[in-house]
Image (spheres, helix red, strand yellow):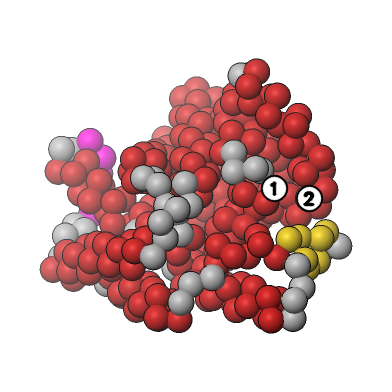
């Protein structure tokens, strides 16, 4: 439970910072963002995993031995989940590059339980996975309320934004891949724990390095010359924001790290529910940044500092919306949250 809550908190911070940095740091290039995130996430993820191995009651060597022994099939399946998660992140960056509102992205992220729930029901009906009796009128109402809230939120958020381009195909791909990798990790950890007769926490920590190996797949974008050339041109900007980037990569890594740990403790629907509640925090932060932009404008300040790094005031312009729009967004986010809570 604690791991899933920490994943939700990290996710809220990540969404806001990614929206802020996409244009100001990465020159609105999803390719540059995924290269940095894949390499940084894999590096910090492996370092964090090995640190946990050192602090755990089981020996470091025991974890290392089991990591190799359990490579087939469980390690390979977890590595595949890492590949899928890197592609989820890529689609997420593309949505931001197309000026998708952070509240819309956060709420669709929050709605992942709906799609996980429906997919689990379908797979259970086909006898592809073992499921308990998940069907109830309460959950069906939750699906309907959540979908209504998402529809209204997107309509409210895009109505006054002429710069928004069609990001829906990327959002659909993002959701499909999210559902697949969440269910894949959950099934792999549960079946592996039963077959190998070990505790879920043990197999989770043991297989975690393979997740980060798969996550590194996102860096394949750097193999294309046009992306390498664009990255070289933008390198002075990336270097200027190096400290915030490192902080963001650590936070982003812990989104997946704690989610993975959570899936070893809880079922996939419950983990998705808890992490989905980050949408409320994203809305609060977006309102605060919009108000801060107005304050800077009133004081005629064109820059502000974050962690010693100077940032243009214009970077916050994307968070500015009329008060009526923010109130409507708040109502829609609450509808989505209500629908999600009906799953409990």
What percent of the width, then of the height, locates residue 91?
Answer: 46, 40
Q: Which residues are magenta?
A: 128-132
Q: Is residue 324 left or right of residue 35?
A: left
Q: Quadrant of residue 312?
A: bottom right
240 or 246, nearer to the observer = 240
Q: Quadrant of residue 162?
A: bottom left
**Contact, CB < 8 Å: mark 2 with mark 1?**
yes
Q: Is residue 151 left or right of residue 202?
A: left
Main SS, magenta region, reads loop
What percent of the width, then of the height, locates residue 45?
Answer: 67, 43
Q: Quadrant of residue 181?
A: top left
Crowd rating for badge 1 (residues with CA inside 10 Å; few <14, some 14–19, many 20+):
many
* Residue under the point 60% across and 53% down: 18
* Residue under the point 60% across and 24% down: 220
108 or 1, nearer to the observer = 108
What percent of the width, then of the height, locates residue 172?
Answer: 33, 43
- The residue carrying mark 2 is 241
SS at mark 2 in the image: loop
* Residue under the point 65% across and 43% down: 27
- The residue carrying mark 1 is 25
């Amino acid at each position: 439970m604690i791991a899933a809550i920490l994943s939700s908190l990290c996710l809220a911070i990540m969404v806001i910072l990614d929206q802020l940095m996409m244009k100001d740091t990465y020159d609105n290039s999803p390719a540059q963002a995924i290269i940095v995130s894949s390499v940084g996430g894999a590096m910090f993820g492996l370092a964090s995993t090995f640190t946990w191995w050192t602090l755990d009651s089981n020996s470091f060597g025991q974890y290392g031995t089991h990591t190799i022994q359990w490579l087939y099939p469980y390690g390979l399946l977890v590595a595949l989940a890492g590949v899928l998660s890197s592609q989820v992140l890529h689609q997420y960056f593309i949505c931001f590059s197309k000026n998708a509102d952070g509240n819309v992205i956060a709420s669709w992220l929050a709605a992942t339980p709906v799609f996980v729930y429906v997919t689990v029901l379908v797979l259970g009906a086909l006898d592809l996975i073992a499921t308990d009796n998940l069907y109830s009128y309460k959950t069906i109402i939750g699906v309907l309320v959540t979908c209504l809230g998402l529809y209204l939120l997107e309509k409210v958020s895009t109505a006054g934004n002429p710069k928004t381009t069609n990001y829906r195909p990327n959002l659909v791909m993002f959701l499909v891949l999210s559902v697949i990798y969440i269910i894949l990790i959950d099934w792999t950890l549960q079946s592996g724990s039963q077959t190998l007769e070990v505790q879920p926490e043990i197999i989770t920590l043991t297989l975690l390095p393979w997740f980060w190996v798969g996550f590194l797949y996102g860096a394949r974008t750097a193999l294309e010359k046009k992306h390498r050339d664009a990255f070289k041109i933008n390198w002075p900007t990336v270097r200027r924001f190096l400290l915030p980037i490192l902080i963001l990569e650590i936070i982003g890594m812990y989104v997946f790290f704690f989610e993975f740990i959570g899936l070893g403790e809880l079922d996939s629907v419950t983990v998705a529910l808890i992490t989905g509640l980050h949408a409320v925090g994203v809305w609060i932060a977006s309102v605060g940044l919009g108000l801060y932009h107005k304050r800077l404008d009133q004081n005629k300040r064109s820059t502000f500092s974050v962690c010693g790094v100077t940032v243009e005031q214009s970077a916050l312009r994307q968070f500015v919306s009329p008060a009526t729009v923010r109130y409507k967004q708040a109502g829609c986010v609450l509808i989505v949250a209500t629908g999600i809570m009906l799953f409990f």
